[in-house]
Amino acid sequence: MRIVVETIVAAPIADVWRAYTTPDDIKQWNAASDDWHTTAATVDLRAGGAFSSRMEAKDGSMGFDFAGTYTRVEAQRLLEYSFGDRTAQVAFTPEAGGVKVQVSFDSEDTHSVEQQRGGWQAILDNFKRYVETKRAR
């Protein structure tokens, strides 16, 4: 099953793209809740390039690596990647007032569709807040 989450970010496409694909920025927004954070991120932004984000509970109780390989990169337009046996696509579409960021991904069997959608949407909402707050400074 494919799950889709999206948001509109009130910022220029160049700022949105950079924040989504730059390790230092990723570490600032990539968490589904305040009790988690991303402690490390790497990005080789090209088809065949690898990416990884180390996500950890702030209390140190657990953590995991979210890693994969980019299969398609179209600057400021589209990212496609594989992670394990799953795939995802991130589309960046300029719209009046900002950029629509739409993430679609293959679901997994461990968590419910609602949990997966909620977690990915929460991360995307953090991304939106981060970019818009950074831009306002």
Image (cartoon, helix red, strand yellow):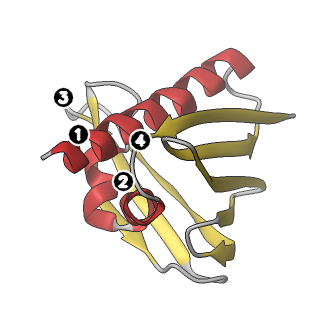
Disc 2 and disc 4: Cα gap in Å? 27 Å
Mark 4: which amino acid?
Answer: Ala
Which dot marks residue 59? Answer: 3
Foreground disc of the pair 3, 4: 4
Foreground disc of the pair 1, 3: 1
| Upstream in sequence: badge 2 or badge 4 | 4
Q: Residue at x 57, y 21 (%)?
A: 118
Question: Are the residues at dot 1 and dot 2 in contact (C-beta closer than 8 Å)?
Answer: no
Q: Secondary structure at mark 1?
A: helix
Asked whether, in this view, residue 3 is left or right of residue 92, the answer is right
Q: Residue at x 19, y 43 (%)?
A: 136
- In the rendered image, which residue does mark 2 sit on? 54
Q: Secondary structure at mark 2?
A: strand
- In depth, the one of 15 and 50 nearer the eye is 15
* Place of residue 15 in the rendered image (x, y in percent of width and height, measured from the top left): 37, 61
Question: Are the residues at dot 1 and dot 3 in contact (C-beta closer than 8 Å)?
Answer: no
- In the rendered image, which residue does mark 4 sit on? 10
Which dot marks residue 133? Answer: 1
| Upstream in sequence: badge 1 or badge 3 | 3
Disc 1 and disc 3: Cα gap in Å? 26 Å
Disc 1 and disc 2: Cα gap in Å? 23 Å
